[in-house]
């Protein structure tokens, strides 16, 4: 009888207070969810951009440099997402992400997205220029006594 009464009391408490998580826990869970979605999106793009850059630096062909530029631009576009930036801004301004690892990840991601809040055309031009500089540097062959 005592056991049954305890079970009923627990059921009532659970029914009355369906959400017993604190605001801090909710914000930290939002941060964890953001990180999971971010990693799912960014890891393949990051890998693709780095492999394309590697190939371009090895081969030096215009085609590979174009692939590298395109992959770098796709990765950079992640950080121009205003919705994601606003979510990070909300999390940061709440001051409720107290877990030291999550707080550090929030700071790094916020700063990365903050840097991406620029005109997309300017970003594309910047990446194009960076690629052109890398291409010139990578393909440069000095001549000594008339030989490369």
Image (cartoon, helix red, strand yellow):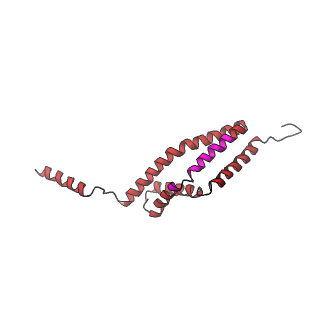
Residue at far left of view:
1
Q: Residue at x 66, y 42 (%)?
A: 68
Q: Which residues are magenta?
A: 66-84
Q: Is residue 118 left or right of residue 147?
A: left
What is the x, y in percent for residue 91? Answer: 46, 59
Residue 104 visible from this viewpoint: no
Q: Main secondary structure of the magenta part?
A: helix
Residue 82 forms part of the magenta stretch: yes
**Quarter of the image that includes the C terminus:** top right
Q: Is residue 126 above or below residue 146?
A: below
- Which residue is more in the foreground, 134 or 146? 134
User: What residue sits 58% from the left and 41% below the top?
Assistant: 47
Residue 124 coordinates in the image, percent (x, y): 65, 51
x, y percent for residue 29:
40, 53
Please tell me whether residue 145 is drawn above or below residue 82 in the rendered image: above
Magenta-span inclusion, residue 36 = no
Query: Is residue 35 something one can see in this rendering?
Result: yes
Residue at image location 71% in from the left, 36% down from the top: 59
Residue 50 position in % (x across, y down): 62, 42
User: What is the total number of numbered labels drawn onto the structure image?
Assistant: 0
Residue sitting at the far front: 121
What residue is at 46 percent from the left and 54 percent from the top?
Answer: 102
């Amino acid at each position: 009888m005592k056991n049954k009464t305890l079970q009923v009391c627990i059921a009532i408490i659970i029914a009355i207070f369906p959400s017993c998580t604190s605001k801090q826990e909710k914000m930290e869970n939002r941060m964890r969810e953001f990180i999971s979605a971010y990693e799912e999106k960014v890891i393949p793009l990051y890998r693709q951009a780095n492999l394309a850059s590697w190939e371009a630096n090895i081969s030096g062909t215009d085609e590979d440099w174009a692939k590298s530029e395109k992959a770098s631009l796709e990765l950079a576009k992640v950080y121009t997402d205003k919705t994601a930036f606003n979510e990070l801004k909300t999390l940061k301004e709440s001051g409720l992400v107290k877990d030291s690892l999550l707080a550090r990840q929030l700071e790094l991601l916020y700063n990365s997205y903050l840097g991406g809040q620029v005109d997309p055309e300017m970003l594309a031009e910047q990446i194009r220029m960076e690629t052109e500089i890398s291409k010139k540097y990578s393909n440069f062959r000095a001549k000594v006594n008339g030989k490369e």
